[in-house]
Image (spheres, helix red, strand yellow):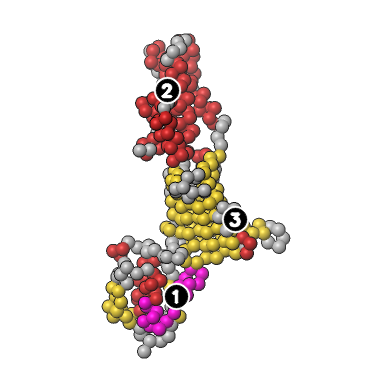
Amino acid sequence: MFEKYARYGLNDFVQDEAFARWVKSPDRESDLFWSEFLVAFPFRREVVDQARQVVLNLKDASRTEVREEDAMEIWQTIQSSIADRRQVVPLWKKRWMIWAAAIFMMIAGVAGWQALNRKTIEIANTTLKPMLIHLPDESQVTLQPHGRLRYKHGFRGRNREVYLVGEAFFDVTRDPQKPFIVYANDVITRVLGTSFNIKANIGGEDVTVTVKTGKVTVYTNRKNAKGKVEAHGVVLKPNQQVAYVKNMKKITKTLVAEPLPVLPSEAIQPLFVNTPVTEIFSELEKAYGVEILFDSELLAGCRLTSSFESKSLFERLDVLCEAIGATYEVVNARIVINGKKCQ
């Protein structure tokens, strides 16, 4: 419903009948539509404001006679600013060109006024449902209830920076030349293009960052004994997360509670027949993108026949370890197998 307007430029809005009708004769239904549009696409507010002003000016202009000498002067100024000095047919003599010059004057005036009024955009989800937000770079943010998101209009500058309070899921458009950075309490999350979730407790200072796809670098700023700020960071991959507790000044890296496969279901082998357990561990490692550490020489003689269909990663590990008399533990987002030699 909103998608076509998300790609509109100034002229598109001005020429759109539904948009012009709303500007000239707003009603409850059209006000609701355009309010919801600006909530979903806040970065389009500037061009919508410009287009609205142009439509209003055109409405007034339709009742006002434009002086031909004024239009001529405007058009001559436009022509003189063009670097290419090729001979131009004096189209300004035509009636429609007079109106074009008048429209150009109004657009330039509105655009100039808007350029002086660029500001930070802040969105608060005051509803009871998640809110989908489209950012200027086509990234998407699902902002949870009571959350707030703030960013500069148009992502001007070297980085794409946003500030988060609450919880949100980010699906970031990849741009290696312009990193995407999220500030949440004392934690800084930096990506080039990936998807991840951040939970920054409202009223508190603890932060959790969970990665779904790609790689994410998470930093926390701390002061050393000399009072200088030092950045401490970790790199996260899918199924990994960090938890930062400020009062302990500690950032902990671990696995998510329920790791999900990173490979498509058809690429995951559900059944193993008389297969070396070391090979099974390696297959699980690839399927979930999780590092599994084990002593390959110690487990070289262990072979199993097992089906892992409809089981989670940890359920599969429970089955494997019970069968070979081993145990496992999660250490720094890695799974470590502690076993003994198979007879």
> How dense is the environment of label 1, judged by Cα within 10 Å: few (below 14), some, or many (20 and up)?
some
Q: Is residue 248 left or right of residue 173?
A: right
Assess whether residue 82 is covered by the magenta stretch. Answer: no
The disc, 3 or 1, on the residue closer to the chain's N-terminal end is: 3
Extreme residue in the right direction: 226
Residue type indicated by callout 2: Lys
Assess whether residue 332 is covered by the magenta stretch. Answer: yes
Q: Which mark is residue 46?
A: none
Tag 3, which secondary structure?
loop
The disc, 2 or 3, on the residue closer to the chain's N-terminal end is: 2
Q: Which mark is residue 204?
A: 3
Query: What x and y, as percent, mark residue 310?
Result: 32, 68
Q: Residue at x 45, y 27 (%)?
A: 51
Task: Name the residue carrying label 1.
Answer: 293
Over which residues does the magenta segment extend?
A: 319-337
CA separation, marks 3 and 1? 36 Å
